[in-house]
Structure formats: C-alpha cells, structure tokens
Image (cartoon, rainbow, N blue to C red):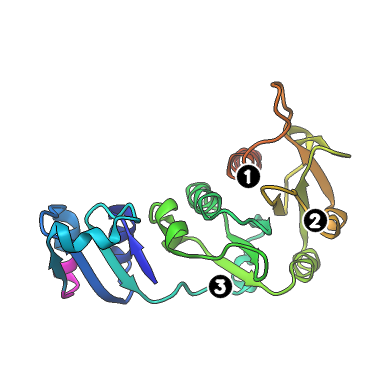
Amino acid sequence: MIVYGRNVAKEILRNGKKVNKIMMQKDFSDKEIISLIEKNNLKYQILDKNDFRRFDKYSHQGIILDIEDFVYSDIDEMMNDENSVIVILDHLEDPHNLGAIIRTCEAAGINGIIIPKDRSVGVNSTVMKTSAGALENVKISMVTNLLQAINTLKKNGFWIVGTDMDDSIDYRKIDYSGKIGLVIGSEGNGMSKSVHDSCDFIAQIPMYGKINSLNASVAAGIMIYEVIRLKR
C-alpha cells in the first residue's frame, strides 16, 4: 500500500512497521523523519521535483512510503475491557470520513472500529493520510456480516446505540454505562433498517439550524465524546 505525508510517515517509522520502499523529494528536510529512517537502517530513494510530479495527486509533503497492506483485527481483541466502546460503521463510503473517525477514536481511546467488507470503504492511502497517523494505534475489524458482528457484541454484554433522527431520544439522555457499541450510519442513507432494528437505543443529536443532518464524522465525534465523558 502506498502512503504519504509526514505525520503518517512518522507513525509508521516510530512503530517499526515493515517498509518496502521510501521515496523522498530532493529538498525534503524533516530532520525527525530522516533520523527515524536512519535509526531503522532503511534505504531511501531521492527524486528531484520533476520525477516527483507523478505523485502530485497525493498530498505527499515530499515523502512517500510503500508499506504492507493494513492488517485488520479480530473482534475478540476489542471486547476485553468491561467499559469497552466499539464504533460500528454501517457502510460508510467516504475515505475522508473514515480517516477522520479513526483519528477521533484514537484521541478518545476507543477500543476498536468495526466495518463491513462489502459496500464500504476499507483502509486505503486516503484513509491513512486523513487519520494523520492515528491508524497505527487503532484496531479495526472488517466483517462479512455486520448484523452477526452486532449479535456477537450483544452476547458479550454490549448495549448497541444507533444514531438517527426518527423514533429516537436526545443522545444526552442515554445511559452509556457498561459496554457500548456505537453505530454510525452511511453518509447518504444512515443506518440500514436491519441494523436500526438491532439497536437497543436510537440516539439523536438535536438540530437547531435549517439542515437536518450532520456529516458522519462530525456526528461520530459528538457521540464518541459524550460516551467517553459519562464513563470518566
């Protein structure tokens, strides 16, 4: 997988992740990254600006790494804590939203994220860049059947909280004690009916303006920090 940007490069090099290839622009001068490369005894290729132009579609900041594909985690790795919070993404399609949610989850200390295999964005270069390196510290499980994953969480003591404007209650009036699975719906359609029906609670974030919905990553940030606030 090709990844790019200084924050991503720093996290990968700090964590000792296997790097297949490093390419730097001739005038690249980030001393911390160069030091990490030397510390890890990694070889790198220096390209002049003309050669680097083929990467202009990326916001590369002068450095590009070729690394192994992202390794997904098993759900079991996320459920051990009695106050576990797991974010469940119901067919998100925008890699920028996924990257932003990963970054929020890392900052909030969330135990993990579950995404479906089909009709959903997976971990790619854009997600890695948007997460600003946070992806290296967040467990993500990709599952074949989202409903089956939710049922597994329920059997292990999780309460499932979905987000919707219909048939819902104010997100600030829900008890978030215990293990929580927080469902965020897709950008265009929200939660699917089957996932909606599997939730124990449906939360809404009040809207006081003229629009009737929030960006998925913004909604996720509000919900995540409300859950964490009440747990701490």
Looking at marks 1 and 2 on the same chain, the residue that comes earlier in the sequence is marked by 2
Residue 121: name its quadrant. bottom right
Span colored in magenta: 36-43
Where residue 86 sits: x, y (%)? 64, 57
Where residue 203 sits: x, y (%)? 78, 40
**On residue 73, which mark appears?**
3
Residue 225: name its quadrant. top right
**On residue 216, which mark appears?**
1
Q: Amino acid at mark 2?
A: Ser
Q: Considering depth in this image, is 70 or 54 the residue closer to the camera?
A: 54
Of circles 3 and 2, the one toward us is: 2
- Classify the position of the C terminus by image quarter: top right
Looking at marks 1 and 3 on the same chain, the residue that comes earlier in the sequence is marked by 3
Looking at marks 3 and 2 on the same chain, the residue that comes earlier in the sequence is marked by 3
Instruction: Classify 47 as above or below 187.
Output: below
What's the distance in space between the residues labelled 1 and 2, CA to CA? 14 Å
- Classify the position of the N terminus by image quarter: bottom left
Q: Considering depth in this image, is 228 or 220 the residue closer to the camera?
A: 220
Where residue 128 sits: x, y (%)? 43, 59
Q: Amino acid at mark 1?
A: Ala
Element under label 3?
A: loop
Q: Are marks 1 and 2 in contact (CB under 8 Å)?
A: no
Where residue 82 sits: x, y (%)? 67, 59
What's the distance in space between the residues labelled 3 and 2, CA to CA? 24 Å
Q: Which residue is under mark 2?
A: 192
Q: Considering depth in this image, is 52 or 156 the residue closer to the camera?
A: 52
**Pointer 2 local density, CA inside 10 Å: few below 14, some 14–19, many at least 20:** few
- In the visual, does 209 lie left or right of 130? right
Instruction: Classify 228 as above or below 150.
Output: above
